[in-house]
Image: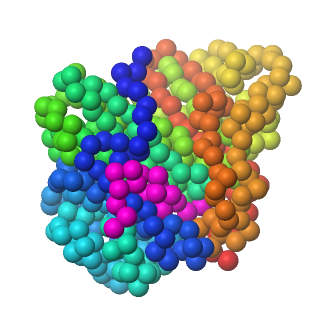
């Protein structure tokens, strides 16, 4: 049973945080495009970033900052231009962003972390950003999480937000998060941004370790299309404003906090996978019987990332052979005679042997999963230049409660793991074929 409860408020649910999101004019559509999260006090900061050799200026900036100091007070995010592969000019733009915001907030630029999302190869539109920063700071609010969540999205159809609360030392402790991501999503981070706030006091090295493990069990376990991005950033702040005793080493309280941090990251990761470009349903792959957690996760990621498996799910085709083939090529040794495959409640393979099942009913299960998590596909733009166009006022959060479940067992080991993804539809190609044209 979980030791936490869900609350409202997103990144401003923890004590001592404000947020804002405005339209600065970075996107041609006129939709919100500049977001800010600020802690009232200097906070312990940790980050996990893209593994791509081609990185955005904001990624290099944050890595350098976090290597020198393990604290920050603000996170600034622009949407519309990725500022990746933009050379020295892009780097200077990033430095100017931090300098301008530092001046407006009356804090050192070293206390500011940066994130960008949008079209690779495009520099930030600095004129609207310069004029937008004072407006952004003026809009900061203790209830500004939703505005910030709306200002970081690009091709997303929905915003992603969560906040949880638990008790440590007889005092409430909260963690909140917002994220964006819909395409260019693959393990080892993805075209995703996620910002997490916490009001506990945690030692810097321990906070980084917690975040890295949480990332492995969440954002590094999702895939939409197999493409890793240049801008992936997961940044977490912990400002100590809950006034609970500092957590300096692993123990009961640290494990409790890490479990809640992982839950926040997993919720946001699943929301990204569900909102995959063109997707109609969320897929969850559960693997058991592996030699260890890493092996189980590798098999799960390979299955959920298989284009053939994803296409079969979109076609509502219970083609278990594609699942078996993906498991077999994951690079993890196992005995074929130990393989078991289930789709929902339908057992399809046992002890490496096919099992007769009701294909019509299994197909109906896939259809029902898509129906339970309906997505406003009619909102998809015909021109995907920089962001999704159109009226977002009718968009509602999608359900994460009824994913397509693929359960695979590969033996008698103690290793288990999960990965999340989505089906692969015709619309994925349409969206990405027209993204910059």
Corner quadrant of residue 328: top right
Residue at position x 60%, y 61% in the image: 155
Image quadrant occupied by the C terminus: bottom right
Residue at position x 17%, y 67% in the image: 107
Residue 329 x/y as whole percent: 58, 38
Image quadrant occupied by the N terminus: top left
Q: Which of 265 and 189 lies nearest the eye of the viewer? A: 265
Q: Which of 19 and 353 lies nearest the eye of the viewer? A: 19
Residue 121 x/y as whole percent: 49, 77
Count the numbered circles shown.
Answer: 0
Using the image, determine if residue 212 lies above or below residue 118. Answer: above
Residue 251 x/y as whole percent: 19, 24
Residue at position x 32%, y 54% in the image: 18
**Can you see residue 118?**
no
Does the magenta run of residues contain 12? Answer: no
Residue at position x 13%, y 31% in the image: 245
Residue 283 x/y as whole percent: 63, 36
Using the image, determine if residue 189 lies above or below residue 291. Answer: below
Magenta region, residue range: 138-155
Using the image, determine if residue 434 lies above or below residue 340. Answer: below
Q: Residue furthest right?
A: 360
């Amino acid at each position: 049973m979980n030791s936490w409860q869900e609350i409202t408020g997103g990144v401003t649910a923890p004590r001592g945080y404000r947020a804002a999101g405005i339209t600065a004019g970075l996107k041609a559509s006129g939709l919100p495009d500049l977001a800010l999260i600020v802690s009232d006090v200097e906070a312990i900061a940790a980050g996990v970033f893209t593994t791509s050799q081609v990185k955005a200026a904001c990624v290099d900036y944050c890595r350098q900052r976090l290597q020198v100091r393990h604290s920050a007070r603000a996170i600034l995010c622009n949407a519309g231009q990725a500022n990746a592969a933009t050379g020295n000019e892009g780097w200077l733009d990033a430095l100017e962003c931090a300098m301008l915001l530092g001046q407006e907030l009356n804090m050192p630029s070293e206390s500011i972390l940066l994130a960008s999302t949008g079209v690779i190869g495009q520099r930030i539109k600095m004129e609207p950003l310069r004029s937008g920063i004072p407006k952004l700071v003026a809009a900061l609010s203790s209830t500004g999480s939703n505005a910030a969540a709306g200002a970081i999205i690009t091709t997303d159809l929905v915003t992603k937000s969560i906040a949880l609360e638990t008790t440590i030392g007889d005092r409430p402790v909260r963690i909140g998060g917002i994220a964006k991501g819909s395409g260019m999503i693959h393990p080892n981070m993805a075209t995703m941004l996620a910002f997490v706030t916490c009001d506990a006091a945690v030692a810097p090295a321990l906070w980084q370790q917690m975040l890295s493990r949480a990332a492995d069990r969440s954002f590094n376990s999702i895939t939409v299309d197999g493409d890793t991005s240049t801008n992936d950033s997961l940044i977490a702040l912990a400002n100590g404003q809950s006034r609970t005793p500092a957590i300096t080493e692993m123990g009961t309280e640290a494990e409790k906090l890490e479990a809640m941090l992982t839950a926040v990251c997993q919720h946001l990761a699943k929301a990204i996978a569900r909102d995959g470009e063109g997707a109609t349903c969320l897929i969850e792959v559960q693997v058991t019987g592996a030699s260890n957690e890493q092996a189980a996760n590798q098999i799960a990621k390979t299955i959920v990332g298989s284009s053939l498996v994803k296409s079969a799910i979109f076609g509502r085709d219970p083609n278990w052979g594609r699942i078996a083939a993906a498991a077999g090529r994951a690079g993890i040794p196992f005995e074929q005679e130990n393989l078991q495959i289930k789709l929902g409640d339908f057992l399809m393979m046992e002890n490496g042997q096919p099992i007769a099942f009701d294909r019509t009913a299994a197909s109906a299960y896939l259809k029902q999963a898509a129906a339970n998590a309906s997505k406003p596909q009619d909102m998809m733009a015909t021109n995907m230049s920089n962001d999704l166009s159109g009226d977002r006022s009718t968009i509602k959060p999608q359900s994460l409660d009824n994913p397509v479940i693929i359960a695979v067992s590969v033996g008698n080991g103690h290793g288990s793991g999960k990965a999340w993804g989505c089906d692969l539809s015709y619309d994925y190609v349409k969206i990405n074929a027209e993204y910059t044209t």
